Amino acid sequence: MDSFLIQGGTPLRGEVTISGSKNAALPLMAAALLTADTCTLRRVPDLSDTRFMLRILESLGAETRFDQGTVTIRAASIRGFGDYELIRKMRGSICILGPMLTRLKEASVSLPGGCVIGTRPIDLHLKGLAALGARIEIDGGYVKTSARKLVGTNIFLGGRAGPTVLGTVNILMAACLAEGVTVIESAACEPEVVDVARFLVSMGAKIHGIGSPTLTVTGVSEMHGADHEVIPDRIEACTFLCAAAATKGEVVVHGSRPDHFAAVIDKLQEAGVRMKQKSGTLLVSRPGRLRATDLTTLPYAGFPTDVQAQFIALMCLAQGTSVITERIFESRFMHVAELMRMGADIAIEGPSAIVKGGRRLSGAPVMASDLRASAALVIAGLAAEGETMVNRIYHLDRGYERMEAKLQALGARIQRVEGE
């Protein structure tokens, strides 16, 4: 397994361009299953997850091509039985269920996997599909669904930790070809959901209320191909903001959408990070000491859970005590023990991490447990004194395109060490 070897202590300086959003690209690729026509997606990040999704679509019978950020998919003839071993390894693959069911009237996929950050059941996905008229059976690790026809209805998708992003897009896609009108209440409002909805509209879907908690879908008889550009990855942008602030650098971020992560910008400014927006760019710098800042992760437009780990790494360097409360996933503090190897002073109390900042971090061998934990450890390594080895970065390769190359262009002393 590959690792990152980091020599810390160098401020990041220069310019970086943000890639397309992984969390939008995966369901956008699944949406191509709704039509026999060719769909084209641009600004698709070259990640292990996107490559994996292409393999899944190909296993269903779709023809795909990926060339310099542009994906073309033609699902003229597909089957409703997904490859068990492929699908179970990636949680995002569950979003093929809705399109397959509504187009073929049957679908069978394995229960998906993903990062170990807490229980992420698909009960709301199945609840929504059942409300549309699907018969559902879970047998031998498979979710087997069938329906003579899907019929629009009112569906409430609120969960224990708020709306479900993948559940919303799954039901949204299934409703596009259902008969009648479907009203999705407590729909997720994340920019990635909005991006998928707009793509569906360009394919011929009739959707109202895009960006709101209530989505109204009037079913159509068929959909057609479309050409779409993926939105920028707001989590990647936030990661580079935190890295620049942690190293006391100055970085110009191109190609992001600051309106998609206003809550993160607000907390960074509260912590003493300087932000300037101008002509589609975002300039981040840290002129003085970092200030301890409290936050709670919440559904959009609150502070995203996917930036919690990176912010904890930053708060390890701040003066004072920060309280970081995680309200989305119950097991998302696995990076804390690794940060403590580097000298961080953090205590876990229930859903909160108590971070006593201001201590120097020192390089150490650390182990990444999930995608965003990997990013947090890289940030800590960049700010630490000495050498840090971040192991198991295959997690990071799932969600960050060419991270080491982008950091090297900013002056970071980081290199990939290939494993066996």
Image (spheres, rainbow, N blue to C red):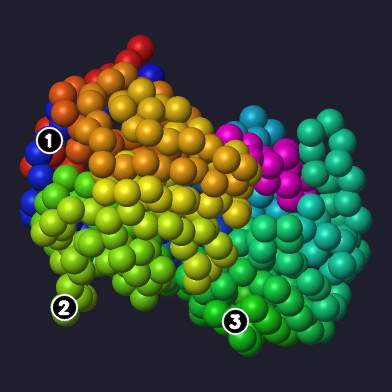
Q: Helix, strand, or loop for circle 3?
A: loop
Q: Give left or right: position of 345 versus 218.
A: left
Return the disc, 2 or 1, that comes first in the chain's sequence: 1
Principal secondary structure, stretch drawn in magenta: loop
Mark 3, residue position: 212
**Quadrant location of the C terminus in the rendered image:** top left
* Residue for point 22% across, 61% down: 273
- Are the residues at dot 2 and dot 1 in contact (C-beta closer than 8 Å)? no
Q: Nearer the viewer, mark 3 or mark 1?
A: 1
Q: Is residue 64 above or below residue 404?
A: below
Please, which residue is most extreme toward the front here?
A: 320
Q: Nearer the viewer, residue 35 or 48?
A: 48
Q: Give left or right: position of 17 versus 216.
A: left
Q: Nearer the viewer, mark 2 or mark 1?
A: 1
Q: Give left or right: position of 299 versus 323.
A: right
The image position of residue 324, as x and y in percent, is 47, 51
Q: Whole-Å distance between the Cαs marked 3 and 2?
A: 28 Å
Q: Is residue 109 above or below residue 263?
A: above
The image position of residue 228, as x and y in percent, is 42, 71
Specify the amino acid type for callout 2. Lys
Return the disc, 3 or 2, that comes first in the chain's sequence: 3
Mark 2, residue position: 278
Mark 1, residue position: 9
Q: Give left or right: position of 19 versus 122.
A: left
The image position of residue 253, as x and y in percent, is 20, 62
Q: Whole-Å distance between the Cαs marked 2 and 1?
A: 29 Å
**Quadrant location of the N terminus in the rendered image:** top left
Q: Which span of residues is magenta-colored?
A: 107-122
